[in-house]
Amino acid sequence: MIDVIARKGIRVPEEDNPTRYITDDAPVSVADSVYYQRRLKDGDLLQAAVRPADKSAEKSVAAAAKAEK
């Protein structure tokens, strides 16, 4: 599993459910699949290093991702 967040202003469809989207609101844990690796390479997704128990880190990663783009 990898933690990802969408680039600011982009909505990325989930691999197994194209009606649900990954946004720039909060990191999401997804499978380390070819689909998500391609979206990372294209720049639509950004990798986020977040520990599930640390909610303050989740907010700071989301803020950093928004500021980056």
Image (tube, rainbow, N blue to C red):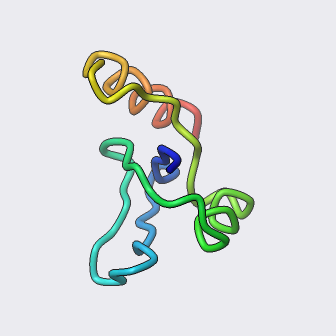
Where does residue 7 sit, x and y in percent of width and height? 52, 51
- Where is residue 30, by image quadrant? bottom left
- Where is residue 12, by image quadrant? bottom left
Q: Residue at x 47, y 49 (%)?
A: 8
Q: Residue at x 58, y 46 (%)?
A: 46
Of all residues, the one furthest to the right in this rendering is: 41
* Labels in figure, total: 0
Q: Residue at x 52, y 30 (%)?
A: 49
Where does residue 66 sit, x and y in percent of width and height? 46, 36
Where does residue 54 sit, x and y in percent of width and height? 30, 18
Where does residue 51 sit, x and y in percent of width and height? 39, 25
- Asked if 54 appears above or below 4 in the picture, the reply is above
- Asked if 50 appears above or below 35 in the picture, the reply is above
For the residue pair 57 and 42, the one nearer the viewer reads as 57
Quarter of the image with the C terminus in it: top right
Image check: 34 left or right of 59?
right
- Asked if 25 appears above or below 15 in the picture, the reply is above
Q: Residue at x 46, y 62 (%)?
A: 10
